[in-house]
Structures are given as C-alpha cells and as structure tokens.
Amino acid sequence: MSFGPPPAGFSPVAAPAWTPPSEIEQALFEAKGRGDWAAYFGALAQDRLFFEIEKGGADATPRATYAVFGYDPRVAGGRIWAVYTEGMLPAPEPHRVFDWNHLEWFAKVWQPTDPPMIVVNPGSPCEAFLPSAPPHSAAWAQYGEQTPPRERSMRLRTLRVGGPLHGPVAHGLACGALLCVNNGSFWNAMAWHGTGYPDERKRLNEWWGITTREQWQYYLRDLLACEQHSSVWDFALGLRRTIARDFGGHVDVGYWRQAAANVIRARSEGSVVVGEDGVTKTEPRPESEVEAHIEGVQRLIGRITRYEARMRADGVLDGNQYVSSVDAWDLGRASKMARWGLGARLGTLKEAEAAVLQAGRAAALSYKSWQDFSAGYILGRCLHFDDEEFGDWYQNMVEAHRILMSDPGSPWLTIPFR
C-alpha cells in the first residue's frame, strides 16, 4: 500500500548518534529513516500516546480531558498538540501531568479551535508532524482504525536510557519487577508516569483507598517496615526458621504444627512482668479462643506447605527450599508504591527514589537471592489474594518469575542481589 507524500515536516533523515529509549521509539526511528510511513504509523497505532493535561481540571473532573497545547516556531501560527510515546515522556513535575490515548482518538476529538498540527515526540530524531484537521487527519488516523493496539501483555520492558540499569536505585526498582512484568511497564522507570495521572490516582484510590499525600506516606512507611501483611504469617514462618536452625535445616510439618500449638498455649497462660513502671499482669486467654487460634495457625501452615510444594513443581523453589519470610510481598509493593505516588503527584521524585533505595536495602537484608525474594513475594501475594485456587494471582506471578529468571536483559540476571 502506498502512503503517499509525508506530512509537512516529516522527511527521512540520516541516522544520528541516538539511542531510542525503548522498542517503540526504535521502530519509529527506523521507519522514519527509511521513509516508511506505513510502518511508522502502524507502530504508533499500537502504543499509548501521552499528552499533557490540566492538573486542576483532572483533579476536579477525572473523567474529562483537559488538553494543554504547546508552541513550536516551525509550525505556522506556532500552536501544536504535542504527544509522546512512553519512553519519551519528560521527567515528572509537580504541576505538569499527562494522560494517554490511542492514535485514532486524536483525529476523532480534534476541534477547529485546536492546533492545526500534532507533533509526535517533539525535537527527537523520531519526531513527526501530523496535520490534525480533516481531511488530512484521515491519512494517519486510518492506521489506528486498522491496527489493534498492542495489549499490555506480560513481558520484560526496559528503558535503555532514562532509567538506571545498575547500582542501588536499579536494585530497588528491580524489587518491583514482578509487578512491572505482569503489567507490561518499564521495570527501571524511576521517573514514573505509569498509565497517566488520572489512572495512577484511580489505581491508588480503588486498590488502597489513597487520595491524599498523608495516606500515601502512611502506606509507604508501613510497606517499607514490612507491616502491611499479617503478623500471623510472620509468626508461623518465624517459628519454622527457629526450628530449622535447631534441627539443621529440615522441618517436619507435623512438628511445626505441634510447636505452633505449644507456643500459642504457653503465650496464652497469662504472665506477670516486673518493669520500671511496676508490675504488669496479663490474664489467661479463654481456652476456646486459644484453640481457635491454634486451629487457624495450623490451617495456615497447611496452606504455606501446599503453596511451596506447587512452587517447587513450577520451578520457583528448588528442591527442599522453603520460603523464609513474606517481607518481599511488602517490599516489592513498596518499590511500586513509591512510583505510584510519584505518578499521582502525591510525592516527589526525590522521595520516591529514597523509598526505592530503602526497599532494595531491606530486601538484601531479608533474602539471599532474587529467587528467594521472588518466592517470598509470590507466597505473600497468594496468601492475601489467591485462597488456594492457584488462579491468576498465582499463575501470573509464576510466569513473571520465569521471565525474570531467564531473559538475558532481566535485572535479576544483571544486578547482583547483594
């Protein structure tokens, strides 16, 4: 199919010394260099295109779109609608935010009062100028109508430039890599825009009930302190670690169950403690309450062992290896929560980076390897969500684990855990 003459300002250029940030910019750059407009717009139609919006308008009416137009002296009249592929987004600023849509949408919503030119990735070697008024817009909008957008399938995505690849910040970002692979987002994007300002705010509200900076800070602190999961999980796993130290590593499940019962009963008998503030006395707990607690912990032990058996069968755990703790469930989410807060403009880039660094340091203290960390994260996620269905909550993480443990570009293979 012949595309015909390119839009004004769109011409093949000699390849400069430029590294495209990701695969989409690479495709656009190569297509532009060949003068292959069909390939250019076909690639553009598959990905999200971000554009600046008014923050105040988005806060007041989240479902509405308040586009902010730009200026470019190369265009007659100077007014443009700047759009960006994901790897070309500028660093987050407190009052500058973005939303996204697909290629054909821009032609559908264009109004005569809007700029006459849309500019893709302004100023970059993969830049393109698109006449935004009909009938000219039909020449590029057709590609969006003919090419289905690429779904956010599970895959490892890395920023070649604009995101750390090595060092402490990259290590902390890699702690959130399971979720990044699962969601098809850049694992090393510290300057996080995510799915755009409105969607990032929606995510925090719907999943966490977070709408304010103070709430974001509270949850981030709790996650970094590994206090956002059940203390009962910590009790059961901590008891097994103690038994393993006493018995050289092997822990009989029956012994573990009985030890849990013994400890719970001992702690429930009441005590007298003499301290600086005087004598503190605790009364014995009712027997029915104690037995119910024991039954609940022993059921939890059964769930843990069944998940571990499945993880061994699926290659997440080796041999007789077991999960030492589920701190990874909190620390992996902390790595992401730091970025979600930045995307929702509840925190700054400096604050997000500090939290990512802290998550990485805490993970290195709690685990020995990326594999250990991954198993702890998966177990915590499944204890919280899956209810032994071994459904998507489990299967998706196993697939993400396999990608991260095998892809040559994976941070889990290129960044030492400790």
Image (tube, rainbow, N blue to C red):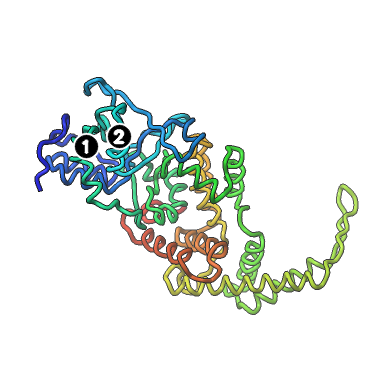
* Residue 259 seen in this snapshot: yes
Point out the tag, 2 or 1, that comes first from the N-terminus: 2
Q: Is residue 375 above or below residue 261?
A: above
* Residue 353 seen in this snapshot: no
Q: Residues within 10 Å of mark 1 (few under 14, many from 20)?
A: many
Check disc 1 and give the amino acid type.
Answer: Ser
The picture quadrant where one finds residue 123 is top left
Q: Which residue is mark 1?
A: 137
**Do the residues bearing badges 2 and 1 touch, measured as CB atoms within 8 Å?**
yes
Disc 2 is placed on an element classified as: loop
Towards the viewer: 154 or 79: 79
Task: Give the total of numbered labels.
Answer: 2
At 29% from the left and 40% from the top, the residue drawn is 108
Q: Position of residue 250 (x, y in %)?
A: 57, 75
Q: Which residue is mark 2?
A: 110
The picture quadrant where one finds residue 199 is top left
At 33% from the left and 42% from the top, the residue drawn is 86
Q: Position of residue 320 (x, y in %)?
A: 50, 74
From the viewer's perspective, is 347 left or right of 155? right
Disc 1 is placed on an element classified as: loop
Towards the viewer: 301 or 340: 340
At 31% from the left and 26% from the top, the residue drawn is 113
Q: Is residue 302 above or below residue 196?
A: below
Check disc 2 and give the amino acid type.
Answer: Trp
Q: CA distance from mark 2 to mark 1?
A: 9 Å
